[in-house]
Image (cartoon, rainbow, N blue to C red):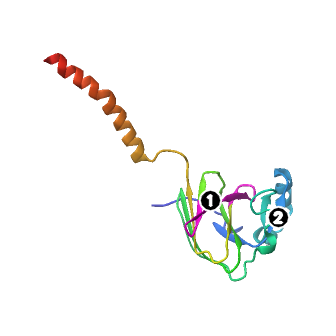
Amino acid sequence: KKVWVYKNNEYAGLQFLTDGVLSFPDKTALLDAMSRATYGRLLSRSFVYAGGPVAGATGELSKKGASILSAEHSPDTIEIGIANEHPVILNITRNYGRGWKCEIDGVLVETFRNYHSFIGVKVPAGSRLIRLRADTGRLPAVSKGSFISIIFITLLLPVLLLRGTRAD
């Protein structure tokens, strides 16, 4: 099954690591700074909104000994294998949304908006597996089918029972 995800390999891959954070008070300041930043600066620092979960995290971050080992993307899941000796920021070039749920080695962690529209995750030292799942709040198809069946049976059963008692 093919999955079509926007990517611009001339800028960055679908995911990349940074070990610095630049925080900005609002959208205008963040976008202005990004428009003036060099390519190297964009790839070395995460551009985030002030007050977010990583706004003051720069001192503890380091890409030394960090690498992305594997990555799989589908429309509603992302799975990334990583090796890192120090905390690092994982940047995923997919649209940020509050519906993305993230687990690092089975522990639920917070995602944040970075580069104004991408997904960011602060990854603790020694992490191995990052899994993101889009929780859209919609019922899966199986649940929808079950729900429709229950309503149909609930409405149809009394009609059939009433019809059967009238015929007697």
State the residue position of label 2: 22
- In percent of width and height, residue 26 lies at 83, 51
Identify the residue at image location x=71%, y=72%.
88
Quarter holding residue 63: bottom right
**Mark 1 belongs to which amino acid?**
Tyr
State the residue position of label 1: 6
Residue 13 visible: no
Spatial CA span between label 1 and label 2: 25 Å
**Mark 2 belongs to which amino acid?**
Leu
Task: Count every numbered label the image shows and give the total.
Answer: 2
Identify the residue at image location x=34%, y=37%.
149
Query: Which region of the structure is painted magenta?
Result: 102-119
- In percent of width and height, residue 45 lies at 78, 69
The answer to whether residue 83 is above or below residue 30 is below
Which callout, 1 or 2, points at the residue further toward the start of the chain? 1
Identify the residue at image location x=38%, y=36%.
148
Quarter holding residue 83: bottom right
Identify the residue at image location x=86%, y=54%.
29
